[in-house]
Amino acid sequence: MKKKAMIALTLAAALVLGGCGSSGGAQESTESTEAGADTEAAAEESAGGGEAAEGTAGGEKKVIGVSLMTLQYEFFQDVKAGIEEAAGDEYEIVFNDPALDMQKQIDAVENFCSQGVDAIILNAVDGSGIVPALETAEEKGIPVITVDMKPEGGKFETYIGSDNFLGGELAAKWALQNLLQDKPDAKVVFLTNPLSSAAIERIDGFKSVLSQEAPDVQVVAEQGADTRETFMSTMEDILMANPEIDLVFSYSAQGGLGAYDAIQAAGREGEISVIGFDASAEEQDVIAEDGCYKGSIMQFPKELGKTCVESVTKVLAGETLEEEIGVEVGVYTKDGIIYAADLQ
């Protein structure tokens, strides 16, 4: 129990410093601490609390530090839920939400290392910016499992992600077969995020299919943003500059929904189709309305989370993992989920 006691004390200190303006990310327990809880209780819950930290076989539970780039969005909430479900009673999980702040995430990983966690699951805010934190974990001998954002350097055991390139390919193939079949010179807009490797892979997958199967399709705009509001603003500008658009493909739900908002506001929902990525609950609702939002690439974020925990178990048992582990995707439509085999 010494490790758990040390972690509890470290977390309590981190929370106290956080209240004084420390840059370190505050840790969140598997059962999230409500805002306003006193520091001692929060630390105890984050660390698992007393005897609850002991494994069922009488040994101490292994501790996994988890930092996901943000818990604001449903996708990452589902990844978190998958981690919690797979961890069950076998592991103690300490969560960090850096809220898209790279420095907070670096601080959190360094805190995990100083606390002596057994493994780290990491969804990086930025693929290059996270490298110093990975180097710290390597120095401490702590294995890191990365998910959904592949770091550009540093040591990590594996990268787990939805097959982003395939997702873009599926979006393009489904669009060509169901939305653009009579428009060989269709005009397409891409909404992306140049800082996201996943976004780049998704757009590249779509472009790959166009170059092979529909070379006359025109890309009239390719612009980036990050929130639904900024994507809406971006799409409003694109609509003003382009009187004719047939399809918008967004790398994310936020982009797709932002485009949807702008298209509706402009009264152009009868002429433009939208395909998003994530198949969030709100996307599924608007797709069911059978309006301009036609589909979204469906990931399985809970499976990503579960695969992360399974990979931790293998690494701690001494196994070597594949460099990359892909998780299947599909196209969510009003008629059901379309998989790669359905679009051959």
Image (tube, rainbow, N blue to C red):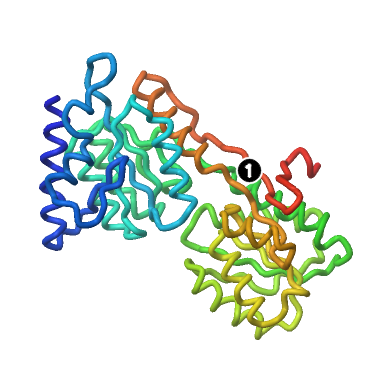
Q: Quadrant of the C terminus?
A: top right
Residue 109 placed where, x, y %? 26, 45
Observer able to see residue 203: no
Choose between 58 and 223: the one closer to the eye. Answer: 58
Q: Please, which residue is most extreme toward the right here?
A: 182
Q: Is residue 116 above or below residue 277?
A: above
What SS does tag 1 mark? loop
What residue lies at 68% left-to-right and 67% top-to-bottom? 248
Quick check: 244 left or right of 92?
Answer: right
What residue lies at 26% left-to-right and 24% top-to-bottom? 61
**Residue 138 is drawn in which quadrant?**
top left
Choose between 260 and 220: the one closer to the eye. Answer: 260
| Badge 1 amino acid | Val
**Neighbourhood count class around disc 1 (C-alpha, 10 Å): few under 14, some 14–19, many 20 upward:** many
Q: Quadrant of the N terminus?
A: top left
Quick check: 339 left or right of 259?
Answer: right
What residue lies at 33% left-to-right and 48% top-to-bottom? 131
Residue 116 placed where, x, y %? 20, 33
Observer able to see residue 171: yes
Q: Please, which residue is most extreme toward the bottom here?
A: 240
Quick check: 20 left or right of 97?
Answer: left
For label 1, the residue is: 329
Choose between 126 and 71: the one closer to the eye. Answer: 71
What residue lies at 71% left-to-right and 45% top-to-bottom? 337
Residue 281 placed where, x, y %? 57, 54
Residue 296 placed where, x, y %? 65, 55
